[in-house]
Image (tube, rainbow, N blue to C red):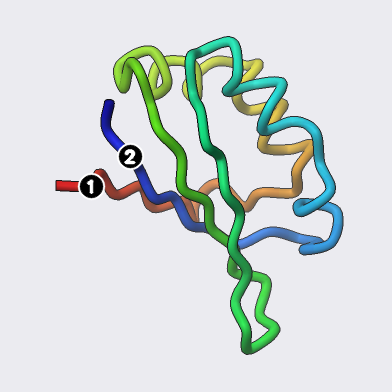
């Protein structure tokens, strides 16, 4: 099961941190151990790590309207999203 790191900018860091959308969206896809991170310098850059059972399913789900809606709810700025896979 690959572990991934995703980072991006958000409109409101406290809202992003408290959002239930990560678990609601990624949980049914078999994603586990979601951990959140914030920039200690106080920018709006945030990140997360998670274990992904099916990378194709997760990447496909992120391309759906549901994925776009989840990112919008969380205040994610989509064009800043970068995903890295543990090697």
Look at the numbered disc 1 and give the secondary structure of its residue.
loop
Q: At x 27% / y 26%, what residue is drawn? A: 1
Residue 74 quadrant: top right
Kindly check if marks 2 and 1 are in contact, taking CB atoms under 8 A apart as contact.
Answer: yes
Q: Nearer the viewer, residue 85 or 69?
A: 85
Q: At x 49% / y 51%, what residue is drawn? A: 79
Using residue 82 as the reference point, say whether residue 8 is left or right of it.
right
Using residue 1 as the reference point, say whether residue 49 is left or right of it.
right
Residue 58 quadrant: top left
* Disc 2 target residue: 3
**Position in image of residue 26 (x %, y %):** 57, 23
Badge 1: residue crowd in 10 Å (few <14, some 14–19, many ≥20): few
Using residue 14 as the reference point, say whether residue 54 is left or right of it.
left
Badge 2: residue crowd in 10 Å (few <14, some 14–19, many ≥20): some
Say which label, 2 or 1, has the lower sequence index. Answer: 2
Q: Distance from label 2 to label 1 (Cα)?
A: 5 Å
Look at the numbered disc 2 and give the secondary structure of its residue.
strand
Please, which residue is most extreme toward the bottom here? 41
Tell me how many marks there are: 2
**Position in image of residue 56 (x %, y %):** 30, 16
Disc assigned to residue 86: 1
**Position in image of residue 55 (x %, y %):** 31, 22
**Position in image of residue 62 (x %, y %):** 50, 24
């Amino acid at each position: 099961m690959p572990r991934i790191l995703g980072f991006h900018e958000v409109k409101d860091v406290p809202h992003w941190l408290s959002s239930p959308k990560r678990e609601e969206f990624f949980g049914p896809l078999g994603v586990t151990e979601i951990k959140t991170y914030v920039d200690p310098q106080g920018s709006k850059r945030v990140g997360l790590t998670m274990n992904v059972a099916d990378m194709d399913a997760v990447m496909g789900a992120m391309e759906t309207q549901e994925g776009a809606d989840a990112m919008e709810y969380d205040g994610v700025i989509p064009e800043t999203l970068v995903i890295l896979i543990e090697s």
